[in-house]
Amino acid sequence: MPDSDTLAFTDRPAGSVGVVTPHVARFDTPLALACGKVLPAYELIYETYGTLNFDRSNAVLICHALSGHHHAAGYHSEEDRKPGWWDAHIGPGKAIDTNRFFVVSLNNLGGCHGSTGPVSHNPDTGRQWGPEFPMVTVSDWVASQARLADHLGIERWAAAVGGSLGGMQVMQWTMTYPERVANAVVIAATPRLSAQNIAFNEVARQAIRSDPEFFDGWYAEHDTVPKRGLKLARMVGHITYLSEDAMGSKFGRDLRSDDLNFGFDVEFQVESYLRYQGDTFSTAFDANTYLLMTKALDYFDPSATQGGDLAKALAPAQCPFLIVSFTTDWRFPPSRSRELVDALIRAGKAVSYANIDSPHGHDAFLLSEPRYDAIFSAFMNRAAGELNLAEAGKDEASEDATSSEETP
Amino acid sequence: MPDSDTLAFTDRPAGSVGVVTPHVARFDTPLALACGKVLPAYELIYETYGTLNFDRSNAVLICHALSGHHHAAGYHSEEDRKPGWWDAHIGPGKAIDTNRFFVVSLNNLGGCHGSTGPVSHNPDTGRQWGPEFPMVTVSDWVASQARLADHLGIERWAAAVGGSLGGMQVMQWTMTYPERVANAVVIAATPRLSAQNIAFNEVARQAIRSDPEFFDGWYAEHDTVPKRGLKLARMVGHITYLSEDAMGSKFGRDLRSDDLNFGFDVEFQVESYLRYQGDTFSTAFDANTYLLMTKALDYFDPSATQGGDLAKALAPAQCPFLIVSFTTDWRFPPSRSRELVDALIRAGKAVSYANIDSPHGHDAFLLSEPRYDAIFSAFMNRAAGELNLAEAGKDEASEDATSSEETP
């Protein structure tokens, strides 16, 4: 049984899992991918928070979104001031309560944070995979995550949880391995991208691929990165992550100085914000990975093999679902979540749905908001109760799970 | 009195102004611009449709949008199959009825279709203006358009009409030269850009300016154009011109071939559409002009000098207004038009407002739609009636103007 990464640290801040150290698992059994290629071997980097219980029944899988990674909670050193990307929801006393659950968070195959991907060494060629890394799909990720579960001795997840692209992986889990998921939490996601969603991804891809420093994906061998393209891709992304209102109240038409400069330097605060986000991302994220992730998003459509019938695609699922959307999310708006909820109901599944009032657009899924936190916690508490998961250090059975989520 | 461009052609198709030839007007009086620079001389290219009446009271000004130009109606030759950009609304029997009105449509200063702009010769340096062409604002355009009116002997426009950025010019006319506008039509516009609007413009500018073939705006001297940047800018633009629903029903998730190709070639129809639109634009439009136009959009905010009070800014206006928005326009949504309507009402102006049910997003303003056409025609007919404009070839006074537009 793997130890919690966090056990060694006693002075962690309240509500935080403290300092964590990633693990790497290696898989030498070839993985056949949806694209027809076979990955002979691969590694997955992951972190864990909390303690796996004796019967290995308290494990929660975290699936990450487009630019996410394994570092979902805690800190990488005592000096580290920036916690993991979902620290708002993972930790002692939080929605995914590490006093109760053993949380597993990995970087997906094709990623650029330590799992095998385009920046990894390709044993067949002796060079980086680069653009030759095979296209990976949501199904491929779920298959690789199932092997990670095997590796950790986890037969069945107490819950699979994810937002955005992460939510798609959760959906896929309930269809591919229904008996291995006790609960599913799908946040700010969609059962398939719209034409507009694909269009924005295509702009991002064109920005990267038309950057002269992309070199058909072999930029590393030219000692460069397609910074301009990645920056543009991220700028477009950021516009779609924020609601128009959030952007308006955050920046409005505020100028960086008192007067217009009648030139092309930064003038409006929103320009400054976007350029900064773009610049930071352009040196921190791998372009080939970004391309792969957007394609995985575009391809996801479980209804496609069922003549467009999503309920039929979801028929194999066995667990209760919590679906969450946010009122001002225009990337994957509430209507897309309701499409999923309707299909689950038609398929006869147990589904709780909450549409959270938030001004923060798609980004809201990353943040803390009282009603979101309460509903997320209630669902996870009920899950813990039904699985008879005790709180760490307590002998009693789990607390009563309150049930405040909306059921349509 | 200038002749109509169309009089020479007798076999024009019904509802069309037929074949038209542009004119060029030269202005040698220096024009002081908002940015502080002075343009010593300039030319404006324009077209006219219909016949200017004896007392020069039937002239209608057409103001163009971001990538528009002077060619708003008719054809440039007998073989030309593509009419001007607003042919749906300008012509005999159309909303802007050329049997009644004399229509003037120009390319704005800074444009790339024949008016003085970045691609013109700078007499001071002996080279193209290029990136040294001064920043022009909506106010500057209106000032230059007023000189064109003087040149044509037009004291007062029967109507100033424009969509999107064109609507902003119409607003400016009613504030700068209230006595020279008898009626104002502002379609799919906004009294000022939101942070999200500015953000999209900034992505477009960054795409162009970071293209290595931009050469700080001196691409012409390097015998090249920043095609990649312009293509990306146009792709982003197109996403914002179409509604999500229109894109969905036009393309959905349709693939160009039966199977996924698991690569980065065009797969979805929407990708093909965007790439085509981007490619076409990238060789047809000048990058420096595109940059200038987006800045004029960003800067427009008549309320800024009035402490944010739009009603106060609009106080000088004297004419009746028709404001039109479209339900699925998310670039300048109905709420932005209502902001303008509310301010006009608070300022005590006569305003008619129609929110047109259309699936076509921002692009709807370019298209024909029965209710849009009817309301637009009714407003223009009433204007003609009040100005006692007779139909060409008729002795009687104008027909009764029906009044079907909504007044909030």
Image (cartoon, coloured by chain):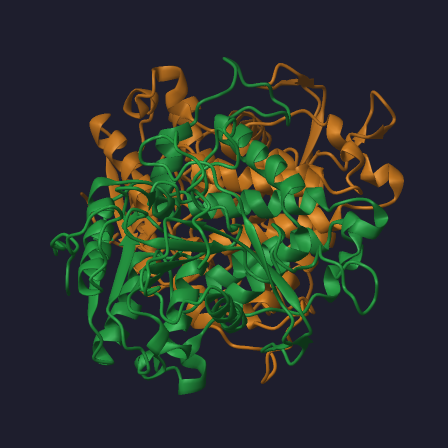
Chain colours: A green, B orange
Residue B291 falls in image quadrant:
top right
Residue at 81% in and 34% down? B218
Report how many numbered discs are placed on residues in the image.
0
Q: Is residue B114 left or right of residue B350?
A: right
Q: Looking at the rendering, in which quadrant would you find the C terminus of chain A?
A: bottom left
> Which residue occupies the foreground of this view, A373 or B102?
A373
Q: Position of residue A56 (x, y in %)?
A: 35, 64
Residue A168 falls in image quadrant:
bottom left
Examine the rendering and report whether any part of residue A312 can be seen.
yes
> Which residue occupies the foreground of this view, A284 or A382?
A382
Q: Position of residue B90 (x, y in %)?
A: 47, 55
Examine the rendering and report whether any part of residue B191 can be seen.
no
Is residue A254 placed above or below A325 in the rendered structure?
above
Q: Looking at the rendering, in which quadrant would you find the N terminus of chain A?
A: bottom left
Q: Position of residue A275 (x, y in %)?
A: 58, 33
Is residue A255 placed above or below A329 in the rendered structure?
above
Q: Position of residue A380 (x, y in %)?
A: 24, 56
